[in-house]
Image: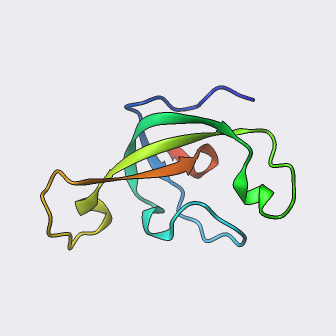
C-alpha cells in the first residue's frame, strides 16, 4: 500500500473519463474541481472487486467537497452549499 497522494485541504480535479465497467465515481462529478475534506482509509478497488478480481493494491479513498454552484450552474440554493463525494485516488489529479 502506498501512502495517500493527497491530504485534507488539497485541491483536486476528478478525471473526466467514460470508461466501461462498474464505476464508483458519479458521472455528474467527473471533470470538476474540489477540495479533499478527509482521507477515509485504504480499500480494495471496488471497480476490480465487481469483476471477481482481488482489487489490490488497496487504494486511498477520499471525501472530496465541491461547491454545488460549480457542479450545477443553475443551482438556486445558498452560495455556500456543498456536496461531498467519496472518490478513489486513481480518479483524482492535482488541480
Q: How many marks?
A: 0
| Image coords of residue 93 (percent x, y) | 53, 45
The quarter of the picture where the N terminus appears is top right
The quarter of the picture where the C terminus appears is top left
| Image coords of residue 13 (percent x, y) | 45, 50
In the depicted structure, whether residue 37 falls above or below residue 34 = above
What residue is drawn where x is 51% and y is 34%? 39
The residue lying furthest to the right in this view is 53
In the depicted structure, whether residue 3 falls above or below residue 14 = above
| Image coords of residue 90 (percent x, y) | 64, 47
Residue 10 located left or right of residue 20: left
Residue 69 located left or right of residue 63: left
Coloring scheme used: rainbow
Residue 84 located left or right of residue 21: left
In the depicted structure, whether residue 55 falls above or below residue 40 = below
Q: Quadrant of residue 43?
A: top right
* Of residues 50 and 72, the one drawn nearer to the viewer in this rendering: 50
What residue is drawn where x is 67% and y is 69%? 19
* Of residues 78 and 15, the one drawn nearer to the viewer in this rendering: 78
Q: Could you tell me if residue 95 is visible in this image?
A: no
What residue is drawn where x is 15% and y is 64%? 77
Q: Could you tell me if residue 18 is visible in this image?
A: yes
Amino acid at each position: 500500500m502506498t501512502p495517500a497522494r493527497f491530504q485534507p485541504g488539497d485541491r483536486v480535479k476528478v478525471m473526466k473519463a467514460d470508461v466501461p465497467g462498474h464505476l464508483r465515481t458519479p458521472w455528474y462529478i467527473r471533470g470538476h474541481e474540489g477540495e479533499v475534506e478527509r482521507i477515509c482509509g485504504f480499500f480494495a478497488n471496488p471497480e476490480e472487486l465487481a469483476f471477481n478480481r482481488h482489487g489490490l493494491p488497496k487504494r486511498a479513498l477520499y471525501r472530496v467537497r465541491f461547491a454545488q454552484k460549480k457542479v450545477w450552474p443553475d443551482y438556486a440554493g445558498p452560495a455556500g452549499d456543498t456536496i461531498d463525494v467519496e472518490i478513489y485516488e486513481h480518479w483524482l489529479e492535482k488541480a
